[in-house]
Image (tube, grey):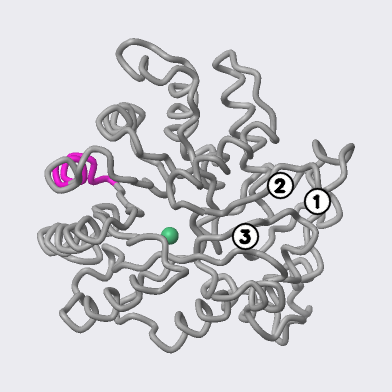
Amino acid sequence: MGKKKNTTPGEEHLVLPTHPSRLERPETEHEPTVDTHTHLLSTYNSYQATYKPGKHQTIWEFVRGMYHGRRVEAIVDVWCEAPVMKAQWKEIADSALTTEGREKDWGGIEYWFVMGVHPHEAKNYNDAIEKDILEAMKHARCVGWGEIGLDYHYDNSPRELQQEVFTRQLRHAIRLGKPLTIHTREAEEDTERILKAEVPKDHRIHIHCYTDSPEWAARMLEHFPNLFIGVTGVITYSSNLNTSAVVRQMVTPTPAVNAAVPESLRIVLETDAPFMIPGNLYTSLPEIKGRRLPLCHTAMLPWTAEFVARVANEAGGSWDVERVMKVSRENARKMYGI
Ligand SMILES: [Zn+2]
């Protein structure tokens, strides 16, 4: 009997080369990377599960190992489990409280987080969990409430309950003035109705990992002037044409869509790590010979930006990796104040 061939590339391949478009300039001149939505603990756990024992023994070692020298400036980590992972989130967030802590543990990366209960877990929501989230909202590194919303693709919690828990969290977030990270999937009508009913027009909203229709995006962008569309590696997948259509629509102003904001790319880049690797990354990794990496991480964002630039150029713009990174970075600041 033949031995089963191990097809997972070695962990050294997770440390990425510089994006080919950036080789001519020193790293200090690259636009910084800000990942506006990442699940750091799941990413680290998935790394640990694949490479046991991995080279990196803590979440901080992992971050420094993967992101060092890649101009990663900030990440927004997402805690959306129910019950709240109290022991874990606080230790991680506390380590980023001081400049010295961020230098020592995070290699200078700015760690931020949002917290909320994901629609999948709406059935587990209760007063105790809400109390824990309200406590986390006071933390100096907390920049928003999320991800919250509706998911009618998986229907892991009953729809009426999802709506109830979504509304309840929205009301708290608005009362506290916290930016919103929204998860919505195949629930356009109800998400729009609830957001428009509950959320003031000028509130900051990040529709994360956008995959819904361009028409819906246009309506939401028009109604909420501080709303941003989150773009992940999913934009590179042939199974998803919507996100590219949304990008083209943004950079092609038409009276019906967004004449008020001509050629404005209202996106923020995000990984939603650990699972959605941008497909075009593999052209930069010939040495792994067609095999697939087991997880994605923040240093992959320049490849997502490359794809966005290509799509935007199809609509007649003049975009490149740096310009997309720059706009996305500015939008991350407007969205989360980071
Ligand atoms: Zn997420």
Give coordinates of residue 114: x percent, y percent: 40, 64
Q: Tell me if label 1 and label 2 are in contact, CB under 8 Å.
A: yes
**Which residue position is annotated with label 3?**
296
Q: Amino acid at mark 2?
A: Leu
Which residue is at a point 60% across and 64% down the rendered structure image?
Answer: 110
Seen in the picture, residue 278 relative to 243 is either above or below; the reply is below
Q: Residue 285 has which mark?
A: 1
- Looking at the image, do the residues carrying marks 3 and 1 touch, with CB atoms under 8 Å apart? no
In this rendering, which labeled residue sits more in front, label 3 or label 1? 3
At label 3, the amino acid type is Cys
Residue 31 belongs to the span the image colors magenta: no
Q: How busy is the neighbourhood of tag 1: few (under 14 within 10 Å), some, or many (20 plus)?
A: some
Q: CA distance from mark 3 to mark 1?
A: 14 Å
Determine which residue is flagged by label 2. 281
Q: Is residue 27 above or below residue 118?
A: above
Residue at position x 63%, y 60% in the image: 297
* CA–CA distance in space, label 3 to label 2: 10 Å
Residue at (15%, 57%) from the top-left corner? 167
